[in-house]
Image (spheres, helix red, strand yellow):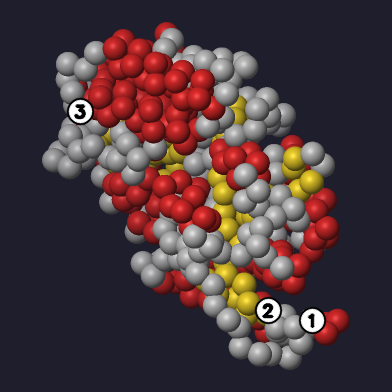
């Protein structure tokens, strides 16, 4: 979940597909490294903790990570890397306490929604002197690098940038008599397709949606952006979602849930709940970026050949998001440099780490999903894309509708104070999905009052 938490920041390029083969999110603790031969320049042995080790439930990806750690340490004598596997890597509820309690990793992940907050609170190290450690630094998209830059100083390494589309199960489309090569382009078509999929029988859900855990508000934001609406006024001082677009987004969900009966009867609260449902092969459609396919296949046992992505229905804009790695402000220069060297190797080298598509293919990963526009069409970006196509393990044409649509839909960043606003917007989402008689106008009015109070308190 993430995009610009910085005021007035907008993405100037259309789209961004990113695929995070980084799985999971950060977590705990440090440790003392064992003495090793000093690295070049006589530096002393250093131990770093790094976030986002894949979970034990994804053993192949976890082994690949562990192999990369071993290779990295072999190539960097004196550096010990300890991994944490908290899932998801970034948890807004635990981030503050972890940081305050001195439990944050040396290298941790922050969604773009939280960049400004983390940087403003001094929770990320100024890494300006060390950006050269990322050898392809200058190939990272300037507009994405700008998001981790404040007052000319750099505080993170951009890792992901994406735009939202409609992820759908091609196998279910076929089973329901729908053409998987002609996915819906309007919300009316989404409703019709969802009804046909739900009619397949017990347990089938035509369209899946979140209702809580901040993910409900996140997806409400996606829906309202697509209709041309906004969450906040242009100056970020007032709520703007109590609008025709906001009502239309909630009315569509209400009608799909209660009139069409195409959304199932189980409330999906956190990120994992809908991903698990999608991986089960019983959910037809959901809003999401290309990394949804990766996670559904890698973490939730989805069949790699079943999924496709198309453009956001009737989109006037698409929510863009992403994440960056940041360095603990308590890190020593040696720890910071070691952490950035790890990021360079694992996340920013063509053909290595997460971009080792040949390895990914042997692991059964969905290689070929359009992703990681963080490098754009720079030489590095082109090399990554060529490698991805060369090692594709699935039909890249499944994603062509998304690629074509994303190039024409303007990206729109998430609102400031996104996580707090999402928590407020969870309420109208859960309201329309849990109560047939939910009053949409009242739900939006109540959320508007809470949002304006939040914004006033934030100043």
Q: Quadrant of residue 146?
A: top right
**Dot 1 alpha-carbon crowd within 10 angstroms: few under 14, some 14 to 19, many 20 or more:** few
Figure check: 447 above or below 52? above
Q: CA distance from mark 2 to mark 3?
A: 52 Å
Mark 1 or 3: in front is 1
Can you give x and y, in whole percent of width and height, for residue 360 in the image? 54, 65
Mark 2 or 3: in front is 2
Query: Which residue in the protein does label 1 denote?
Result: 43
Q: Which mark is residue 97?
A: none
Q: Quadrant of residue 206?
A: top left
Q: Residue at x 72, y 80 (%)?
A: 76
Q: Are marks 2 and 1 in contact (CB under 8 Å)?
A: yes
Judge from the rendering whether residue 73 lies leftward or rightward of residue 53; answer left or right: right
Judge from the rendering whether residue 316 lies leftward or rightward of residue 270; answer left or right: right
**Which quadrant is the C terminus positioned in?**
top right
Residue furthest out toward the left: 202
- Regarding residue 177, the answer to whether it shows in the image is no
Figure check: 77 above or below 299? below
Q: Residue at x 70, y 44 (%)?
A: 148
């Amino acid at each position: 979940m993430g995009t610009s938490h910085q005021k007035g920041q907008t993405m100037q390029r259309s789209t961004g597909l990113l695929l995070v083969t980084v799985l999971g999110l950060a977590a705990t603790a440090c440790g003392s490294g064992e003495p090793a031969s000093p690295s070049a320049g006589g530096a002393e042995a250093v131990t770093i903790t790094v976030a986002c080790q894949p979970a034990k439930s994804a053993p192949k990806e976890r082994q690949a990570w562990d192999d990369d750690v071993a290779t990295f340490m072999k190539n960097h004598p004196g550096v010990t890397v300890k991994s944490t596997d908290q899932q998801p890597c970034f948890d807004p509820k635990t981030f503050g306490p972890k940081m305050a309690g001195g439990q944050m990793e040396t290298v941790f992940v922050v969604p773009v929604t939280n960049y400004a907050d983390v940087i403003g609170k001094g929770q990320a190290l100024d890494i300006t002197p060390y950006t050269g450690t990322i050898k392809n630094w200058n190939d990272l998209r300037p507009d994405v690098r700008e998001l981790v830059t404040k007052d000319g100083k750099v505080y993170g390494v951009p890792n992901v940038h994406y735009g939202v589309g409609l992820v759908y199960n091609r196998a279910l489309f076929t089973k329901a008599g729908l053409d998987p090569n002609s996915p819906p382009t309007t919300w009316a078509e989404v409703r019709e397709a969802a009804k046909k999929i739900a009619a397949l029988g017990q347990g089938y859900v035509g369209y899946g949606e979140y209702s809580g855990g901040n993910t409900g508000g996140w997806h409400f934001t996606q829906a309202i952006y697509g209709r041309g609406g906004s969450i906040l006024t242009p100056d970020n001082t007032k709520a703007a979602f109590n609008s025709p677009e906001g009502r239309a987004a909630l009315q569509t969900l209400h009608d799909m849930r209660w009139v069409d009966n195409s959304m199932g009867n189980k409330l999906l609260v956190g990120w994992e709940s809908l991903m698990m449902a999608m991986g089960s092969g019983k959910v037809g459609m959901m809003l999401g970026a290309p990394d949804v396919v990766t996670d559904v296949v890698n973490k939730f046992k989805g069949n790699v050949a079943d999924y496709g992505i198309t453009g956001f229905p009737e989109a006037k804009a698409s929510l863009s998001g992403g994440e960056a790695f940041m360095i603990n402000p308590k890190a020593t220069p040696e720890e910071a440099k070691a952490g950035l060297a790890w990021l360079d190797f694992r996340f920013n080298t063509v053909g290595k780490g997460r971009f080792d598509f040949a390895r990914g293919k042997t692991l059964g990963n969905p290689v070929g999903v359009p992703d990681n526009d963080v490098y754009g069409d720079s030489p590095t970006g082109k090399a990554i894309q060529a490698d991805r196509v060369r090692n594709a393990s699935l039909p890249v044409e499944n994603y062509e509708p998304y690629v074509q649509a994303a190039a024409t839909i303007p990206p729109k960043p998430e609102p400031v104070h996104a996580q707090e606003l999402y928590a407020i917007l969870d309420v109208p989402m859960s309201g329309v999905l849990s109560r047939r008689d939910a009053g949409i106008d009242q739900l939006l009015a109540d959320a508007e009052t809470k949002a304006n109070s939040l914004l006033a308190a934030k100043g």
